[in-house]
Image: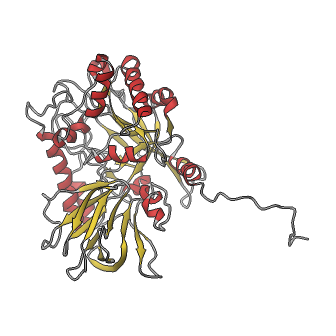
Amino acid sequence: MHQITRNFFRRNQREPIPISRMASTSSNVNSTDDTSALSIKPKNGLSRSTSLLNITESAAQILIQQNPVQGTDDHVEKFSEASTSLSLPEQHSNDKKIESLASQSADQFEQGSGNNGKLPDVVVKDNDTRKASFKLSWRVEGEQSEQHKHDIISLTWASHPMTVLIFTKLKSPPVDLVCEDMVRWLKDYKNLEIYVEPRVRKYLLEKSPYFEFVHTWRDGDDTEITLLHKEVDFVVTLGGDGTVLWAASKFKGPVPPVVPFSLGSLGFMTRFESERYKETLDSILKGPINITLRHRLLCRVIKYPAKSSDDETEDYTLVLNEVTIDRGESAYLTFLNCFCDGSFLTSVQGDGLILSTTSGSTAYSLAAGGSMVHPQVPGILFTPICPHSLSFRPLIMPEHVKIRVEVPRKSRSHAWASFDGKGRIELKLGDALEISMAPWPVPTACLENSTTDFFNSIHEGLHWNLRKAQNFDGPTDLN
């Protein structure tokens, strides 16, 4: 870890400040030793803060959650050594950017939409507390040694969750029925505040005026969506992996824990059965729950003639699966120059290039010949699409690098970039795309644990290495 990165987190370090809860929802945070990692404090009001997590000396630093805390600008807690899988980019050039992004995210939360930063139909009164606190901890199972550790990440609620945000798959009557039933149950039996997308609230009100209690935001208002993180304790998705990607895209900073229910055609992240949602949500609300921290990529488009993305005011896009750069409708091969940490890496001539997270390794990257990688392995997959070369094999980069993909001025055509399959934009001659690991992973709930869920998903979803067994009554080389 570069010295400047450690110094940045050290000088921001403060002792955690205890936050009082409302009388009706008292907080009981169990004391933890230094192997029990993070304590996230609840929100009280709409004050600004940037929460920084300080990890032990041999581990990397991350910004995983930014919860407003009354009476302080930031609070710092220690992580266990197991959090090395969540490390931020280590290079010196990224330090300033990470600090700026954290500040920028907090500024966005503070802006609001007028009326003292409150959202109509979404944000509650300033004196109300809506954000539940939780802590993350690491435990070791299996053979415990320096060479072999099995780290499982658990989330424990320190105060009872009070709000849930539900995302649903588009144009699916079965999903709509499950959503309607789930909303009734969560309100009647769990007394939760419930938020849904505008189209879902409209559907529910068409079914019955009973659903007037459901909250939403103004359709197309990005400012209101940005503020959702301050109100939501956890997220439920009803659909497939695409619904999880859609939900994650709504959070341009920290993401609440996500509980994905399988109601789609194929799901590597959706391990929970919708038929058992009551049992599942009961377990989630009680805790503790095992989670997978899924890394995201932070992508910036650099328009020619700009040379770099040093301008911190530039917008960025976060992807959970992959960013794809291809030739679009052009009849010519894509010609791309690739740089890693400022050094020339290679040129791509072919249909394009995929830069993927390890969660996205079972998606487009896999179809293009990339390897399947466990989602908690930190790294960036570099996978060419139909390269015009016999020796162009896929790579897996370390998580701390910054990759720049540039369309050379001498290229015979433009290129096109898409982010998790949407937001397609044109890259003209001289334009570039910069990709690095984002400081805000997506915590998804596990059915069992991260490793078991991953193996089950590739067995069930891809029938990995499924073949007919060889007969054992034939010839043998044994005496």
Up-down: is 136 above or below 314? above
Query: Where is the N terminus found, in terms of image quarters?
Result: bottom left
Look at 16% across and 33% down and name the residue there.
46
Answer with the quarter of the image where residue 118 lies.
Answer: top left
Picture coordinates of residue 47, whole percent (x, y): 15, 36
Answer with the quarter of the image where residue 61 lies.
Answer: bottom left
84 or 462: which is nearer to us?
Answer: 462
258 or 388: which is nearer to us?
Answer: 388
Picture coordinates of residue 131, whole percent (x, y): 28, 31
Report if residue 42 is visible in the image.
no
Up-down: is 157 above or below 242? above
Answer with the quarter of the image where residue 356 lies.
Answer: bottom left
Look at 22% across and 65% down and name the residue there.
426
468 or 34: which is nearer to us?
Answer: 468
* Coloration of the structure image: secondary structure
Left or right? Give the position of 475 relative to 230.
right
Picture coordinates of residue 412, whole percent (x, y): 25, 80
Up-down: is 475 above or below 225? below
Report if residue 430 is visible in the image.
yes
Query: Where is the C terminus found, in terms of image quarters?
Result: bottom right
Q: How many marks?
A: 0
Look at 20% across and 56% down and name the residue there.
99
Up-down: is 28 above or below 413? above
Look at 24% across and 49% down and name the residue there.
13
